[in-house]
Image (cartoon, rainbow, N blue to C red):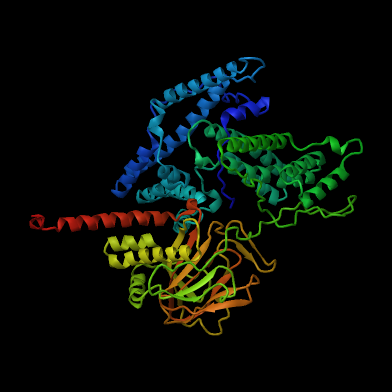
Amino acid sequence: MRERIWAPPPPPLLLLLLLPLPLWGGPPDSGRGRGELEPERGPLQPFDLLYASGVAAYYSGDYEQAVRDLEAALSSHRRLREIRTRCTRHCAARRPLAPPGTGPGAELPFFRALLERARCYRSCETQRLGGPASRHRVSEDVRSDFQRRVPYNYLQRAYIKLNQLDKAMEAAHTFFMANPEHMEMQQNIENYRMMAGVEAFQMTDREAKAHLESYSAAVKHYEADDFEVAIKYFEQALREYFNEDAECRTLCEGPQRFEEYEYLGYKAGLYEAIADHYMQFAYYRVGEYVKALECAKAYLLFHPDDEDVLDNVDYYESLLDDDLDPESIEAREDSAMFVKRHKLESELIKSAAEGLGFSYTEPNYWIRYGGRQDENRVPSGVNVEGAEVHGLSMGKKSSPKIERDLREGGPLLYENITFVYNSEQLNGTQRVLLDNVLSEEQCRELHSVASGIMLVGDGYRGKTSPHTPNEKFEGATVLKALKFGYEGRVPLKSARLFYDISEKARKIVESYFMLNSTLYFSYTHMVCRTALSGQQDRRNDLSHPIHADNCLLDPEANECWKEPPAYTFRDYSALLYMNDDFEGGEFIFTEMDAKTVTASIKPKCGRMISFSSGGENPHGVKAVTRGQRCAVALWFTLDPLYRELERIQADEVIAILDQEQQGNHELNINPKDEL
């Protein structure tokens, strides 16, 4: 997954002064005359009000109204973005800016044109929206929900209530594309697919960007060695990418806050992957060595010291016709303009920061993104006359070293909790073992409620035995527990305990590892694994194979690749055990070879193991050979963008319950007591 970086958008006025002339003014809308806009569609309804109405209808059980309002909210949100983009381009075309001249007052025509453009935009926006733009300002919570595609979660549930399976599946898939950590949605999609009899590739992402779809198609053809078709899709993806980039820039102009578009972070990695990594080899394979060389040199604009690509450049140059001067072949023009503009923007931000008195350090936007490991490298020193070349370097991104300060030993916050072992005693990094996090009574209560809320395969895409055929896995989330408690299927007090002890664990982890920012839930899951009778003789498998929580463990390479489908956003993990009346089931840490055990922990009531989630802590679970082993598994993130959706919903349920309880206390007051 790509790294999410925020940086302030460039100051629009200074940017206009320094950008190359071809970028001034902006392109007119395609398919229309200069300055024309599409016809009116009537006043636009604020999407936040429609969203609130849809959610209220959903919880009241009016699923038809919920669908109408939620679909209208998504349409309004899409239309708002379109209007803002079109108005900006429309006014840029009608009010072109010219570079300031020389002499006294020579800059005044420029500023006049700039003010006219701003007035044009405000008038256009008001006209197209059918009212003041202030009606469409929304809260950070609503903006976050639309960024995370939360409306589609409500939609998929409403559609399935209405027996509209195709639309439910489409909404679920759209939500899942932005929330790949959402285990329940994974299970829903699997169920929908089985019901509808469709394959994963047939599912539609309603929010998919055109350039990403073209890029995906290009990669598929590339992997199939169909390089001519791959090139066509790569070039198409680039054109669509620049259109998206222009729209994103448009939305960053002015005083509005458009953090959700993540402009500067969004633009770097994908462009680099499309234009440079894949295309150079594709062009090489079809014999277009000049274009291959242009792409390789484009990559060096981002990473000038990459030895593999420097070797590739030398190799491509050796393949050119004798009448071609390698020095005359430059990097792709679009790449050169891209990097030039980025450097200008960076200089402007640094200059503005210095003038305003705050420090600014530019992040590294040119993150290398993984493809195939290193089967695509042109071997150095090959005989260029007849060597069989296997491709260019596309190395995986290994799990990086932890950049934050590695600290531990902070307060445990609660009485009676017993410290057992720290990282050094557990032979590793960022590890801690604690006892008495739960009392015996709480363990019994949790174990009792587990039998009433857990479903076979929950959290494992419905698979009864996801890790080993010799055990049965059952699970439940916090939200499901609260729902069952609210419906009276289990004691509400016990369901609430599940919520409370997971919050207690989060606070302990945050405090003990002395984190200087908030730790959020990424996923919370109560899980029990039961040994299947008659299948335990001579077992040599694990209950859960050795793995790391935020990267793909590669024992042979002694690496952990931080890339999808790993949950790369996870930062800390914890396991809180509920019982010990079973055999086997020890939790183990290993070296990265997945064989050498560095620590083994026997679960028992109230015991908690916590650790950082990266490749520094490979771990697994030994076979459960008799009985049932139950625990609460918790994964945490420091990035609020990846907060567990069900946890947020559970927080809302708890707030409602607390409010109802407060109301009941108030109703029980004897009026005479007020006298």
Q: Is residue 102 placed above or below 514 in the rendered structure? A: above
Image coords of residue 662 (percent x, y): 23, 56
Q: Nearer the viewer, residue 562 or 410?
A: 410
**212 sits left or right of 636 in the view:** right
> Is 209 placed left or right of 473 in the picture?
right
**Which residue is painted at 50% across and 78% down in the image?**
585
In the image, residue 82 lies at what x, y percent?
49, 31
Q: Quadrant of the C terminus?
A: bottom left
Residue 459 shown left or right of residue 336 in the figure = left
- Farthest residue, direction front: 357
In the rendered view, tell whether residue 341 sits above or below residue 131.
below
Residue 462 seen in render: no
Residue situated in front as seen by the camera: 497 or 584: 497
Q: Is residue 320 above or below residue 105?
A: below
Residue 25, how many percent across, how many down? 60, 23
Residue drawn 66% across the image and 45% down it: 218
Whether residue 572 appears in this view of the structure is yes
Q: Position of residue 125 (x, y in %)?
A: 45, 25
On the image, which quarter does residue 230 sit in? Answer: top right
